[in-house]
Image: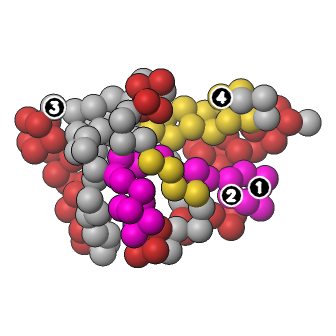
């Protein structure tokens, strides 16, 4: 999302990331990765539980082929792993909300390398703009 933040903003959207690390970790992450949007902390999993975001078990975390391939691709692309916080098995999710908190797009990750496609997020921003009209 960082690389496309200007495009997202130009479409009337914004990004808020919610992580599992401490405030100290989140501050370091924002500084190290030059994150231009808000990063919040959910180290007690209140937001993750409310959004029904999945967790994986240790076996899946280590042995799921999709996760291993995704980790290798991320490493090869130069991404580094940061401290994940207390819940190392917490998966992610992406939501696009329109005014009035209408959910126009939802992607709940199924494994550690499963993430929302940027094309889908951008398309949802267009839908959200239509809801706002």
Q: CA distance from mark 1 to mark 2?
A: 5 Å
Q: Is residue 127 left or right of residue 69?
A: right
Q: Are marks 1 and 2 in contact (CB under 8 Å)?
A: yes
99 up-or-down from 72: above or below: above
Q: CA distance from mark 4 to mark 1?
A: 17 Å
Q: Are marks 1 and 3 in contact (CB under 8 Å)?
A: no
Q: Which residue is depicted at the point 86% across and 36% down?
A: 132
Sequence-wise, which precedes: disc 2 or disc 3? 2
Q: In this picture, which residue range is highlighted in magenta? A: 8-29
Q: CA distance from mark 2 to mark 4?
A: 17 Å
Q: Are marks 4 and 1 in contact (CB under 8 Å)?
A: no
**Front-lying residue, 96 or 21:** 21
85 up-or-down from 109: above or below: below
Q: CA distance from mark 4 to mark 3?
A: 28 Å
Regarding mark 1 in the picture, which secondary structure is present there? loop
**Front-lying residue, 16 or 56:** 16
**Front-lying residue, 76 or 50:** 50
The residue to which callout 3 is attached is: 57
Residue 115 visible in the snapshot = no
Regarding mark 3 in the picture, which secondary structure is present there? loop
Q: Which residue is depicted at the point 73% across and 60% down?
A: 9
Quick one: label 2, few (<14), some, or many (20+) residues within 10 Å? some
Q: CA distance from mark 1 to mark 3?
A: 37 Å
Indicate yes or no whether the magenta region holds residue 94: no
The residue to which callout 4 is attached is: 103
Q: Which residue is depicted at the point 22% across and 33% down?
A: 56
Q: Is residue 74 left or right of residue 50?
A: left
Indicate yes or no whether the magenta region holds residue 20: yes
The spot of residue 22 in percent (x, y) is 36, 53
Residue 86 falls in which quadrant of the image? Answer: top left
């Amino acid at each position: 999302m960082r690389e496309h933040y200007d495009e997202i903003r130009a479409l009337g959207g914004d990004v808020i990331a919610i992580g599992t690390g401490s405030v100290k970790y989140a501050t370091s992450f924002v500084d190290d990765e030059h994150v231009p949007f808000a990063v919040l902390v959910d180290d007690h999993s209140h937001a993750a539980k409310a959004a029904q975001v999945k967790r994986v078990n240790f076996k899946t975390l280590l042995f799921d082929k999709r996760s291993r391939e995704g980790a290798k691709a991320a490493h090869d692309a130069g991404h580094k792993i940061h401290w994940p916080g207390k819940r190392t098995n917490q998966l992610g999710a992406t939501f696009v909300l329109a005014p009035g908190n209408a959910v126009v797009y939802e992607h709940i990750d199924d494994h550690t390398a499963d993430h929302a496609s940027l094309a889908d997020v951008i398309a949802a921003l267009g839908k959200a703009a239509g809801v706002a009209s």
